[in-house]
Image (tube, grey):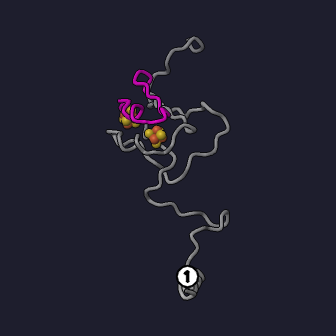
Amino acid sequence: MIAPILNNLMSALFKKPFTVKYPFEKLELSKIHRGHISIEIDKCIFCGICEKKCPPKAIAVSKADQSWEIDRLSCVTCNACVEACPKKCLHSEQHWSPAQDKKGVTDYFVKKDTPVPQSPTNV
Ligand code: SF4
Ligand code: SF4
């Protein structure tokens, strides 16, 4: 009865801990870690598949404006957009998005050389 307990105790004494001493050590993330979604905007064809596949509707694509945007607070890092993108221009980075204190703030990307849309303030 006492032998298995002693075995567990002895092995626990010599095993490497599963935790790290943050902030002195940083956790090494797995290669399949799902984190900050990034885009290579110049490869994007604005097909809108990622927008349709995104469960929380965190992505908005505009073919007319050649733009792609993401609401980081809504993204649940499910990777559905990365897997569905036909141009392989979406990536799940090995880090999380920085903290944000406001809702509704989006990261906006526009293809290079796209003319700036005319608005009442820049006509
Ligand atoms: S699925 Fe890929 S190519 Fe299509 S709009 Fe999204 S990022 Fe662009
Ligand atoms: S990782 Fe999931 S939740 Fe985040 S933008 Fe892509 S599809 Fe949407």
Seen at 50% across and 21% down, the residue is 116
Task: Specify the farthest residue to the left.
Answer: 86
Nearest to the observer: residue 33 or residue 6: 6
Return the x and y of residue 7 as percentages of the image width and height.
Answer: 54, 86
- Viewport quadrant of the N terminus: bottom right
- Over which residues does the magenta segment extend? 45-66
Decide if residue 114 is in sight here.
yes
**Above or below 45: residue 81:** below
Return the x and y of residue 24 as percentages of the image width and height.
Answer: 67, 66
Return the x and y of residue 9 as percentages of the image width and height.
Answer: 59, 83
Decide if residue 44 is in sight here.
no
Sort mark 1 into few (<14), some (14-19) or many (20+) by Cα contacts within 10 Å: few
- Viewport quadrant of the C terminus: top right
Return the x and y of residue 93 as percentages of the image width and height.
Answer: 48, 50
Seen at 39% across and 35% down, the residue is 53
User: Which secondary structure, mark 1?
Assistant: helix
Where residue 16 sits, quadrant-wise, is bottom right
Residue at the disc numbered 1: 8
Task: Specify the farthest residue to the bottom.
Answer: 3
Count of labels in the image = 1
Left or right for 18, reference 89? right
Seen at 41% across and 42% down, the residue is 90
Q: For the residue marked with disc 1, what is the amino acid?
A: Asn
Q: Is residue 16 magenta?
A: no
Q: Is residue 55 magenta?
A: yes
